[in-house]
Image (cartoon, grey):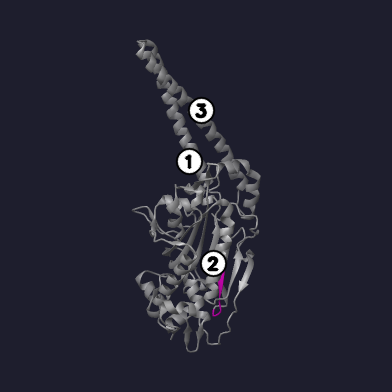
């Protein structure tokens, strides 16, 4: 959430940068925020003055009673009763103003970093890096959903029977390969200095608001209505909320966490061949990396996260590319996002496997993640997160790109985790 002080001081800049996102009615909403904020501040000032007068009168009343001047004291008590009514009215008015103001603030996305290109959709994203050789497969090469059936490692129909579409069952070497990838990703992350945590898979409303998943405009979160809890769409939500309402010290930075969790997304409106098999699921496994950083270090940290994921993909020997997301494709809370995609040779298409984002202080303002700077003042931290990595499309790429006539070759780096070097 953008801070009110920032909005007041940077109205034109915000409207200009939100245009890169194609955000509608930016000028109207920003103007309403500034207007409501002015009303809030004047109402708060009026309320503060009345409260100060009430406190002053209360002291005078006590003094009159002590000196035996009860008549004067009672006259002042009548005045304080009137002030209490005014205080009540102003408090109620202030509550309404603040609620309306928050509703407006929740509608405003983060402003994009200056390097974010303008654009309307994923087709306008900018390719900034590409590496790895795309293998040449035989004419008999199969997409991963057919390989899964051929080698009996993933059963999509059984998952559909138990739960529904988008909930596959991993079997035998397929299940072990999943577990191997999770262990490998966690080991790589912890070796790079990330502390492993195991967070809850359900979060409360405050946590969803804190990281920006709520309000859920697209209806992508699973809601446990009786308890008003939400199944996590990513480990970013519970991990980042570990630091909600925490006042940090500069010496605490950098704070680096990693976690493996299942993730749950309704993926409403996702249909067609492009979401077949592992391409898009309602439940999937992911290893996440999350950082809480000093504002001056956050973009250096973002570069480090990008290089870390590049190293993992190089070891997996997968062809991949990195894209800088355009304004029309960047997430609501992000200032700058890089997407990683692997090339699926059997499908002849690129598959997104990771997003690495810097949210600057947008999430921190919602979460109240602050630190004491060198001047002793409280300042908002910066938050970052990335997939390291999401398993379904990594697995799809591994199965399709490494298929041979004799089976599916396992990358060397994973063999010590799987205990086998081939699926046949």
Is 6 above or below relative to 213? above
Quarter of the picture holding the C terminus: bottom left
Work out whether residue 330 can be spotted.
Answer: no
Q: CA distance from mark 1 to mark 2?
A: 42 Å
State the SS at label 2.
helix
State the SS at label 3.
helix
Q: CA distance from mark 3 to mark 2?
A: 53 Å
Left or right: 84, with 37 as reference point:
left
Q: Find the magenta span and give its range.
A: 340-346
Residue under pointer 2 = 308
Q: Residue at x 47, y 33 (%)?
A: 93
Foreground label between 1 and 3: 3
Q: Position of residue 346 (x, y in %)?
A: 54, 80
Residue under pointer 3 = 46
Q: Main secondary structure of the magenta part?
A: strand
Q: CA distance from mark 1 to mark 3?
A: 18 Å
């Amino acid at each position: 959430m953008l801070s009110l002080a920032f909005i007041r001081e940077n109205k034109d800049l915000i409207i200009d940068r939100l245009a890169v996102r194609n955000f509608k009615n930016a000028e109207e909403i920003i103007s309403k925020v500034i207007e409501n904020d002015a009303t809030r501040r004047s109402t708060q000032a009026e309320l503060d003055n009345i409260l100060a007068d009430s406190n002053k009168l209360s002291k005078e009343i006590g003094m009159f009673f002590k000196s035996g001047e009860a008549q004067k004291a009672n006259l002042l008590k009548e005045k304080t009763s009137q002030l209490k009514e005014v205080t009540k009215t102003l408090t109620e008015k202030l509550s309404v103003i603040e609620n309306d103001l928050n509703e407006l603030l929740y509608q405003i996305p983060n402003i994009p970093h200056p390097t974010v290109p303008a654009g309307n959709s994923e087709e306008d994203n900018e390719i900034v890096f590409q590496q790895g050789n795309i293998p040449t497969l035989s004419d008999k090469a199969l997409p991963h959903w057919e390989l899964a059936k051929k080698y009996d490692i993933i059963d999509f129909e059984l998952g559909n029977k138990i739960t529904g579409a988008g909930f596959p069952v991993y079997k035998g070497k397929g299940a072990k390969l999943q577990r191997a990838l999770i262990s490998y990703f966690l080991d790589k992350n912890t070796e790079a200095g990330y502390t492993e945590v195991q967070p809850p898979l359900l979060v409360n409303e405050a946590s969803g608001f804190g990281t920006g998943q709520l309000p859920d405009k697209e209806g992508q979160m699973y809601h446990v209505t009786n308890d008003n809890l939400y199944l996590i769409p990513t480990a970013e939500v519970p991990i980042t909320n570990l630091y909600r309402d925490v006042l940090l010290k500069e010496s605490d930075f950098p704070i680096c966490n990693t976690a493996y969790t299942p993730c749950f997304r309704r993926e409403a409106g996702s249909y067609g061949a492009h979401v077949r098999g592992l391409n898009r699921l309602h439940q999937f496994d992911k290893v996440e990396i999350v950082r809480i950083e000093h504002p001056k270090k956050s973009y250096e940290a973002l570069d480090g996260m990008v290089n870390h994921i590049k190293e993992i993909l190089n070891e997996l020997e997968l062809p991949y590319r990195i894209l800088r997301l355009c304004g029309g494709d960047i997430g609501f809370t992000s200032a700058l996002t890089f997407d990683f995609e692997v090339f699926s040779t059997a499908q002849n298409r690129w598959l997104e496997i990771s997003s690495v984002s810097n949210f600057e202080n947008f999430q921190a303002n919602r979460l109240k993640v602050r630190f004491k700077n060198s001047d002793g003042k409280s300042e908002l931290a910066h938050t970052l997160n990335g997939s390291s990595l999401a398993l379904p499309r990594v697995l799809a790429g591994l199965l399709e790109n490494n298929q041979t006539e004799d089976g599916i070759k396992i990358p060397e780096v994973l063999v010590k985790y799987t205990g086998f070097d081939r699926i046949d």
